[in-house]
Amino acid sequence: MKKYLVIGNPINHSLSPKLHNYWLKNNDINGIYDKEQLDSSELKNLIQKIRNQEIHGANVTVPFKKKIISYLDELSPEAKITQSVNTIYLNNKKIIGHNTDVEGFELAVKETKYGVSGKKVFILGAGGVVASIISALIKMKVARITISNRTKSKAESLKNLFNNITIVNWGEIPDFDMIINATSLGLKVEDKINLDFSNIKKNKFFYDIIYNPKETNFLKNARVLGNKVANGKKMFIYQAAAAFNTWHDIYPIIDERINKILD
Ligand code: ATR
């Protein structure tokens, strides 16, 4: 039986096993997908297990997406651009790091039918997933990307990867068409982002990477003010589907059951 894993710390909340195990069964693949909480010191050993084919593939989540890179042999173009790896596999005796968050975000935004090309996008946060979002937005030909993060230096360091982004202070709201919450604010139901959007015009697009809770205060307030909103559920599903396709060479079905698993 082939073995797959998602690693992170914490990892308890991860719904990746539910998606992947459903798809494994659905496609008659003799495999199992688990979750494992690791410390940094255990990353090397994990890669060794993939090399020995004790483990056949791994997903990587917070806080290891960057840290894992030093243990890998090669990066896919998407992983290289973002310096972020969420999918690992063995190919021709080499451990490859790939990034399916870029594809996940791109497909999720396309599915909303919001035409992002030529738009001004404002991103809140500068954590692990933001480089993937920027990369997808550049691919989708947005006009401008502005980033704001509580710790400004972290936003500034994204300029080493993408020189065309603008950084503003936390609390400042530049002109935008689409705004993305990529902070962890909203994971707790009572979380509020202390930015006031009541003066902006309607018909902006508010996107939250968070999908649990389904509607953060960020999205709720935006919806009440008359804006278009979407949560991160589809991004999560599409990044998982792309990882599944990377390992099994089968693009899995995304049906109602999959949508329900995450509700
Ligand atoms: P990491 O920063 O380790 O990559 P993450 O979950 O990917 O972790 O990112 C968390 C994001 O939420 C960061 O942008 C963080 O801002 P800092 O870089 O200043 O820590 C942001 N964040 C978390 N709590 C916040 C808060 N109370 N106010 C504003 N931003 C917050």
Image (cartoon, rainbow, N blue to C red):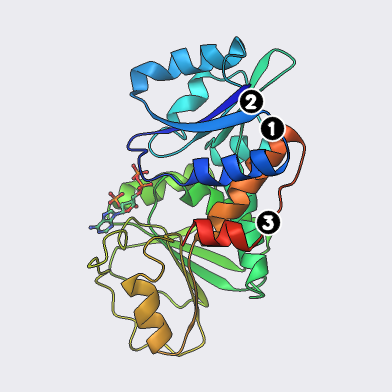
Q: In the image, residue 84 lies at what x, y percent? A: 52, 37
Give the residue drawn at x 57%, y 30%.
32
Which amino acid type is shown beneath numbered disc 2? Answer: Tyr
Q: Which mark is residue 247?
A: 1
Q: In the image, residue 149 lies at what x, y percent? A: 33, 57
Packing grade of label 2 (10 A; few <14, some 14-19, many >=20) is many
Which amino acid type is shown beneath numbered disc 1? Answer: Trp
Look at the numbered disc 3 and say if its residue's Cβ is closer than 8 Å to ligand 1.
no
Packing grade of label 3 (10 A; few <14, some 14-19, many >=20) is few
Q: Secondary structure at mark 2?
A: strand
Q: To which residue does mark 2 refer? A: 89
Is residue 254 something one can see in this rendering?
A: yes
Give the residue drawn at x 60%, y 59%.
257
Which amino acid type is shown beneath numbered disc 3? Answer: Lys
Q: Which of disc 1 and disc 2 is earlier in sequence?
A: 2
Q: Which of disc 1 and disc 3 is earlier in sequence?
A: 3
Q: Secondary structure at mark 1?
A: helix
Tell me the distance, in whole angstroms, between the alpha carbons under discs 3 and 1.
Answer: 24 Å
Residue 102, placed above or below residue 5: below
Side (left or right) of 195 relative to 18: left
Q: Which mark is residue 30?
A: none
Residue 170, placed above or below residue 96: below
Q: Quadrant of residue 170?
A: bottom left
Side (left or right) of 239 relative to 36: right
